[in-house]
């Protein structure tokens, strides 16, 4: 699926002096890890680099080196090149049009639903994470993998593979992980910070969500719902919902798990997870996308309406 080669992208980056590296709204571990790895590596190559993430780096990833260098609002200056990482479409990239206007936009991603919105595009749906692509790009650039860059890449890859347990994990994934460990990455330390230790607010919002757990008549679909009030009472935000949808999916007999999260702007964010069903296709019916087993969309309207519409679409595919 790649339209351009990594060699072409490396050439553009080498010719650019001022570069903006950014990623999608509500970033996950792959987004943040890829952003930090590429941004830090380009800085070490002598480039002027700004790293931008809407709202800043989520709390659970702030232990990574360089996290305090990521700005939370778009810089107001001209760039030679802007790199969008792990972002499937332009609407999910929070960089204003006026910043993009005169820059070379490079789109690097692994989502099969990516609509190739950049002037240069490298989209590899076979990659387990965008972090794998960044690893290859850094080799093309001849950039050094110090421990900070290696840790960022390890977070990117380990989070998008579910700590190397999802079906997207490949032989290449493990080879790259091995190279990162050789750079000094401590997997136990990172796994504890990323997967195990949770703030109280995340546990409280999980409690709220589990109290809403519901099933389809045949037990093949399970879903959780969260209102804006639920999040406020728990003191939680979107970053605290990471992985919560899996509590619905990982129930014996369930094929598709869903999480409905009410937003205060009159929309509902929906997370899809499955074992065999192509949930990216289901999410696409509502203007969303993602991966075959993990996808998402945003539905306009109230929570009850969103649940009804999405469940109707999922039921058509997986059962009554």
Image (spheres, rainbow, N blue to C red):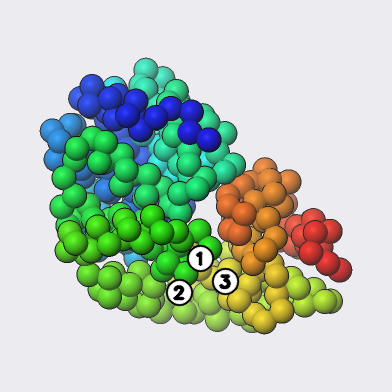
Mark 1, residue position: 166
Give the alpha-carbon distance from disc 2 to disc 3, as whole Å.
Answer: 14 Å
Going from the N terminus, do you reach mark 2 or mark 1 first? 1
Nearest to the observer: residue 68 or residue 114: 114
Number of other residues with Cα within 10 Å of mark 3, as a class: few under 14, some 14 to 19, many 20 or more: many
From the image, state whether disc 2 or disc 1 is nearer to you: 1
Quadrant containing the C terminus in the rendered view: bottom right
Residue most extreme to the top = 102
Label pair 1/3, CB-CB below 8 angstroms? no
Residue 198 falls in image quadrant: bottom left
Secondary structure of the residue carrying numbered label 2? helix
Horizontal and vertical percent position of residue 281: 69, 49
Mark 2, residue position: 202
Image side of residue 123 versus residue 211, left or right: left
Which mark is on residue 22? none
Please say whether residue 225 is visible from this viewpoint: no
Nearest to the observer: residue 276 or residue 257: 276
Which mark is on residue 246? 3
């Amino acid at each position: 699926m790649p339209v351009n080669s990594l060699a072409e992208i490396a050439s553009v980056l080498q010719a650019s002096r001022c570069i903006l590296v950014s990623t999608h709204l509500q970033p996950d571990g792959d987004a943040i890890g890829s952003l930090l790895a590429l941004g830090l590596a380009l800085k070490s190559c002598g480039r002027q680099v700004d790293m931008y993430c809407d709202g800043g780096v989520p709390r659970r990833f702030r232990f990574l080196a360089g996290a305090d260098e990521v700005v939370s609002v778009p810089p107001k200056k001209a760039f030679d090149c802007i790199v969008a990482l792990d972002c499937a479409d332009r609407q999910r990239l929070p960089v204003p049009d006026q910043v993009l206007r005169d820059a070379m936009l490079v789109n690097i991603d692994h989502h099969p639903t990516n609509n190739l919105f950049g002037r240069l595009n490298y989209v590899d749906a076979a990659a387990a994470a965008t972090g794998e692509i960044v690893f290859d790009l850094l080799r093309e650039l001849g950039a050094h993998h110090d421990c900070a860059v290696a840790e960022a890449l390890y977070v990117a890859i380990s989070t998008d593979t579910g700590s190397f347990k999802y079906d997207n994990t490949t032989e290449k994934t493990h080879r790259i992980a091995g190279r990162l460990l050789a750079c000094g990455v401590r997997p136990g330390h990172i796994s504890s910070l990323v997967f195990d230790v949770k703030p109280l607010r995340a546990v409280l919002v999980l409690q709220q969500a589990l109290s809403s757990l519901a099933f389809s008549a045949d037990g093949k679909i399970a879903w959780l719902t969260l209102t804006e009030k639920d999040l406020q009472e728990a003191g939680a935000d979107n970053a605290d919902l990471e992985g919560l949808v899996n509590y619905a999916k990982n129930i014996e007999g369930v094929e598709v798990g869903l999480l409905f999260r009410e937003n205060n702007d009159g929309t509902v964010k929906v997370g899809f997870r499955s074992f065999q069903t192509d949930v990216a296709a289901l999410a696409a019916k509502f203007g969303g996308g993602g991966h075959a087993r993990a996808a998402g969309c945003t539905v306009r309207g109230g929570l009850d309406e969103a649940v009804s519409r999405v469940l109707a679409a999922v039921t058509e595919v997986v059962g009554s």
